[in-house]
Image (tube, rainbow, N blue to C red):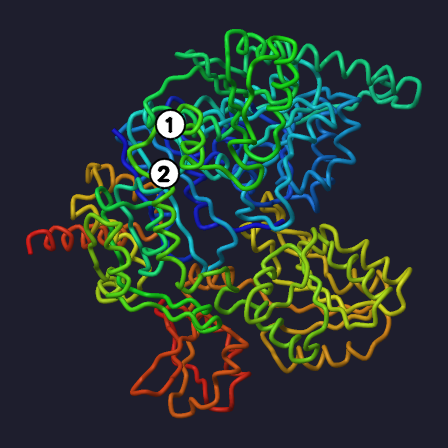
Amino acid sequence: MKFDIILTGVGGEGVLTSGVVIARAAALERYYVRGVQPHGLAQRGGAISTCIRFGSKEEVSSPETMQANADLVIAFEPLEAVRAVHYARKQKTHFVINKHPYVPVYADLLNLPYPKMNKIIKIIKPFAKKIHVFNAYNLAKKKFGKIIFGNMILIGYCFGLGLIPLKKRSMLESIKITAPRELEENLKSFDLGLEAGKKSIKV
Amino acid sequence: MGKKRRNANISKMKTEVSERPGKKIALLGNEAIARGVLETGVGVATGYPGTPSSEVLMVLSLLAKKLGFYFEYSTNEKVAFETAAGAAFSGVRAIVSMKHFGLNVAIDSVIPVAYTGVRAGLVIFVADDPGAWSSVQSEQDTRYYARMASIPMIEPSNPQECLDFTKEAFKLSEEFKIPVFLRTTTKISHSIGTVKLGKIKRIKMYGKFKKNSDDYYNFRPHLQVLHDRLNKKLEQVERKYGQKLNKIFPGKGRIGIIASGVSFEYVKESIKELKISPPIAKIGLSYPISKKFLKEFLKDKRVIFVVEELEPIIEESVKKIAKEVDPSVVIHGKDLLPRSGDYDLGKVILALEKLFGKKLGVNLVEHRKNVEKVLKDLPPRKPVFCPGCSYRSTFYAVKKIFGDAVYAGDIGCYMMGAFEPFKMQDFIISMGGGIGVAHGITRVSDQDVVVFIGDSTFFHAGMSGLLNYKFNNERAPLIIVLDNGITAMTGHQPHPGSNFTGAGEKVEPVRIEEIAKALGAEVRVASAFNQKELLEALKELKKIKGPKVLVSKGECRLLTIRKLRRKCIAIPKFQINEEKCKNFEQTLKEFSCPAIIKIKKRGKTIYKIDPDLCWGCGVCKQILPKGAVELKGEEKK
């Protein structure tokens, strides 16, 4: 077995930390874990992505997911979801997109308009088995008054959809190790997302 | 040097990296190296930060006090190496850490220490960056340094090996009394992997330098004695550790693959994907390469494929040895894979498809074409200055005064100034390189030249260049030292201008303006968040003929925000007054703050400040007409 997750977004959103949460949860379940954070010059505001992969030691060894081979893309930002199609293919890849665009300053400076949400979905469609759109930041803002907890809500949402093949117990344990500051809010965020995810399956 | 931060995860690293023995956890390659250092037990750890190496030092800096070893962020890699060497000369185990370009700075001192040898383990950790994820200078292959310096080089492939090989490196170093390179690349250092932990050791830190030793008598003709001794050591290392650190994975067929570093991980997974099982030789000791090991592997092979990123170093060794073993063996390497950039699973699979005449279920070439098609017209998200960055404000002011002068760049967050709308890093050579190259330009051209350099970079390699202005250049370029108080880009490591050391001791900060004065420059200091102050200082300095320096002071906003949040102090938030939203376009384009967003509303273009992104520097209020921007209130908590 091997499972490949791509997390992508904008520097400062907690993309790397969220990846570490999943990686550690998988390690707690004794999976062999690999992954990579090939971050470059991305300051707060630059594009950032990370791969997390786990499975049996015989099958998983590369730190980076192969092109067209991700099981799940978690996009914290819609435009960055598009850039992740590199890792995705129709037969396999689920996309979960946080509907909270950050328009890069270069859209204006280089006169390349930021695509509308329906255009984004249209571009991704040929590379996706299914696309799930959700506004985790709205929920975070509503519940906590700030968007920073949106990342754990988003991870919880993916989990609620049944897209992360790990146990809830290990996810919570991993959050405890990885995000000890404001732990209560982080755990609550995960649960909020989880419930929202479950609900959206039923609909 | 050419770098990126990852400070937010420090508290996590601290808890994880110091976990108990026997536990299996997911660690970054660099964290695993730090753990390997702790399991070996060192007395001294030094270095200069630089992506992708920085996390090793970050972890060690946090644990130094608790575990009782000496830690320092040195002013540059050469000093860091010398400090570690001094400890190893005195019988205390030491590690020094740097990125590949850092080794260029240190190398002058490194080579002689191979001759003198050491009294305790000395490991030089170097991280290369194929693909230049976080470097701008070159795609240098550090493995050549091992050959030039006659220093053994060990290369792990994954985080578990990062831990294990760090311990091996110290063992080798102590057994042969020789410094050892531990080399990784970005996709090892920044890769995550399951690691089984061993026991952390504490060792005593006190040593003694033994005087009157022949080891340090490197005058001729004794220098040749030391040189011969070094060569003998290498022969022994090749015999002993060539067997220990290299490994053959048996398989079927007469096509063999030789790989090292992260390439081995790609090969291992690729052959599973392609359902082939060729024999593989994994090289863990990349210098000296074991001839015996390669000969054994080559014996019954018809074809060999060497998979290594960057230069064909192993490939050349294999070709040489094949001539002795069997000249009819066909050797592939750089004919199937590129010499530039980093590799990935896809690239290795495509090469193996060709070599083995096999096909993966998915057509990667076609996939890539489809991807390129859809990504073509999307706006890029290149790196930008953070919202509230003091550098944006400084660049904005400098452009107002100096227009299209020649702008010498350097290594640090100011590299973001290379992109639109500033485009004010006309060249970037190396740490401190801007000052020297700018001097050369003014000797032959009468253009205005302005040099940007950061605070940490100024301490690292800027001072001697400035002194040269005083000595040799009456028409010196203006140097702007962007002083944000910290080594921001690599994750907020302290430097001599900070008020604390790497191990967390309080110290008196060194003032850049005082150094610049002492080196013969006319100096002005301005607040980076105050446009008026900046513009006035720049105008004054423009008139001065000799060496001149502007120290533009403004704390790294990331750091300020972190401090404010920790103390539960509110962050000011600004908002744009829609009514006065006329003719902003040009100004805001030139300023390009990511927190200011352009929206079309009822056919009109209006601007808004995203309260989630604004970090309250207030500079937009200064550059827009009066009343256009106002303080909105404050972020909660």
- Residue that mark 2 sits on: A66
Q: Residues within 10 Å of mark 2 (few under 14, many from 20)?
A: many
Residue displayed at 74% across by 51% down: B461
B469 w.r.t. B318: above or below: below
**Type of amino acid under label 1:** Glu
**Type of amino acid under label 2:** Met
Q: Nearer the viewer, residue B405 or B87?
A: B405
Q: Can see residue B184?
A: yes
Quadrant where the C terminus of chain A sits is bottom left
Residue displayed at 40% across by 81% down: B607
Q: Nearer the viewer, residue B185 or A191?
A: B185
Q: Position of residue B521 (x, y in %)?
A: 83, 67
Q: Nearer the viewer, residue B157 or B174?
A: B157
A22 w.r.t. B431: above or below: above
Q: Quadrant of residue B72?
A: top right
Q: Position of residue B34 (x, y in %)?
A: 52, 32
- Residue that mark 1 sits on: B269
Q: Can see residue A180?
A: no
Q: CA distance from mark 2 to mark 1?
A: 10 Å
Q: Position of residue B364 (x, y in %)?
A: 36, 40
A174 w.r.t. B488: above or below: above
B107 w.r.t. B168: above or below: below
Residue displayed at 21% across by 58% down: A133
